[in-house]
Amino acid sequence: MGGQNPYIQHPEVPLPTRPFKVTFQPMNIELDVNPDQLPYGDHGLPGSLLDIALHAGVDLDHACGGVCACSTCHVVVSQGADSLNEPAEEEDDMLENAPGLKPNSRLACQSVPDGSCDLVVEIPCWNRNLVKEEH
């Protein structure tokens, strides 16, 4: 499963128009994001932090496939949170189920940067998927 939840209203979120960087902590993986290549896949809202992370091979759990139906892609945006779209009510509802909630917590599947600044995103230790499944 992946993409968007057909049972909730998703706002039209514009994709960025200029390059920016996203650094995922604690792994210290810095990614250059080219807006001309977004969206990378079908992981959450187009151009979401989840989409960016998965495209770069960053392990970020997302049990529902990125459709805003769980809280497993919970991240803490320690820098650049102002460049993200506003959270919808459905995202806020799902975040209430996330452990370790902080004021700058977001669901990676619903957070789309606008490219106005670089971001630093912390993936909580309980949310790093270290299991690799063989196909």
Image: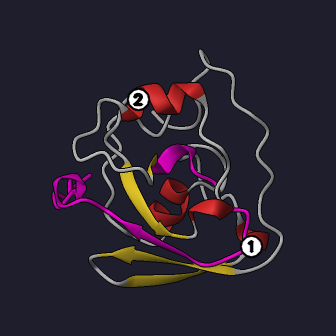
> On screen, 122 above or below 6?
below
- Colour scheme of the picture: secondary structure
x, y percentage for residue 87?
Answer: 59, 39
Q: Main secondary structure of the magenta part?
A: loop
14 or 42: nearer the eye? Answer: 14
Q: Amino acid at mark 1?
A: Ser
Q: Which residue is mark 1?
A: 116
x, y percentage for residue 101?
Answer: 30, 45
Look at the image and tell me whether residue 68 can be seen: no
Assess whether residue 22 is covered by the magenta stretch. Answer: no
Residue 26: quarter of image: bottom left
Q: Identify the disc placed on residue 43.
A: none
Residue under the image location 73 percent in, 63 percent down: 114
Residue under the image location 76 percent in, 46 percent down: 13
Q: In the drawing, does residue 89 fall left or right of residue 132?
A: right
Q: Identify the disc placed on residue 94.
A: 2
116 or 14: nearer the eye? Answer: 116
Q: In the drawing, does residue 98 fall left or right of residue 20?
A: left
x, y percentage for residue 102?
Answer: 34, 50
Circle 1 Cα neighbour tier, 10 Å, few/some/many (<14 / 14–19 / ≥20): some
Q: Secondary structure at mark 1?
A: loop
